[in-house]
Image (cartoon, rainbow, N blue to C red):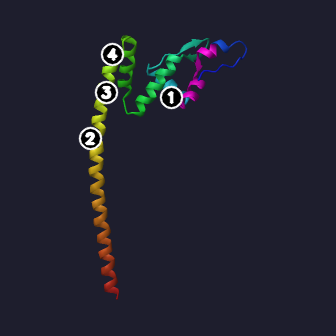
């Protein structure tokens, strides 16, 4: 959310641009996170004197970057996706790439889910065997003591 405060004639600037602090607060990340993605070339702020300022486009790109990371995409995959947006005004190539990446990610997650389900079943079986062994051992201990 861009600030609309009127601080000494800066309201026009803050209606259009975000400072790193404003953008970080708006996206619930740290300024360091924003600078990290800037260093990686995923966003490119403008300068207002010595201050870096971010556009609404930068904010939208940051939101896409954060969503991509949350969904498990690599920075390379996110950068490829964002670069296509700049190259293809129709966005058809971007959508095709997104669809392929989403399908690949879903397939990988489904494989992981199956592996997790198998591991959980095996661990529950081991747990049951261990509990049975303990119960048998305790029953044997009680008979020996009595």
Instruction: Give the Cα distance between marks 2 and 4.
Output: 29 Å
Quadrant housing the N terminus: top right
Looking at the image, is 94 positioned above or below residue 123?
above
Instruction: Give the Cα distance between marks 3 and 1.
Output: 24 Å
Nearest to viewer (mark 4 / mark 1)? 4
Sequence-wise, the earlier of marks 2 and 3 is 3
Identity of the residue furthest to the bottom in this view? 146
Any part of residue 79 in sight:
yes
Q: Is residue 48 left or right of residue 58?
A: right
Q: Are marks 4 and 1 in contact (CB under 8 Å)?
A: no
Residue indicated by mark 3: 101
Tell me where the magenta segment starts and ends, as one range: 13-29
Query: What is the chief secondary structure element of the magenta stretch?
Result: helix
Instruction: Give the Cα distance between marks 4 and 3.
Output: 14 Å
Sequence-wise, the earlier of marks 2 and 4 is 4
Q: Residue at x 31, y 62 (%)?
A: 127
Sequence-wise, the earlier of marks 4 and 3 is 4
Instruction: Give the Cα distance between marks 4 and 1.
Output: 30 Å
Q: Residues within 10 Å of mark 2 (few under 14, many from 20)?
A: few
Q: Is residue 101 left or right of residue 34?
A: left
Q: Nearer the viewer, residue 10 or 93?
A: 93
Label 2: element kind: helix
């Amino acid at each position: 959310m861009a600030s609309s405060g009127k601080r000494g004639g800066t309201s026009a600037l803050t209606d259009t641009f975000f400072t790193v602090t404003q953008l970080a607060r708006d996206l619930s990340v740290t300024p360091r996170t924003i600078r990290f993605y800037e260093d990686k070339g995923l966003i490119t702020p403008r300068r207002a004197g010595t201050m870096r300022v971010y556009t609404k486009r930068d904010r939208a790109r940051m939101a896409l970057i954060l969503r991509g990371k949350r969904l498990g995409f690599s920075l390379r995959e996110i950068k490829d996706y964002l670069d296509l947006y700049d190259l293809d005004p129709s966005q058809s190539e971007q959508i095709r790439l997104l669809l392929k990446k989403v399908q690949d990610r879903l397939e990988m997650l489904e494989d992981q889910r199956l592996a997790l389900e198998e591991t959980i079943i095996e661990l529950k079986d081991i747990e049951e065997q261990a509990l049975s062994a303990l119960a048998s051992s305790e029953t044997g201990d009680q008979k020996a003591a009595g």
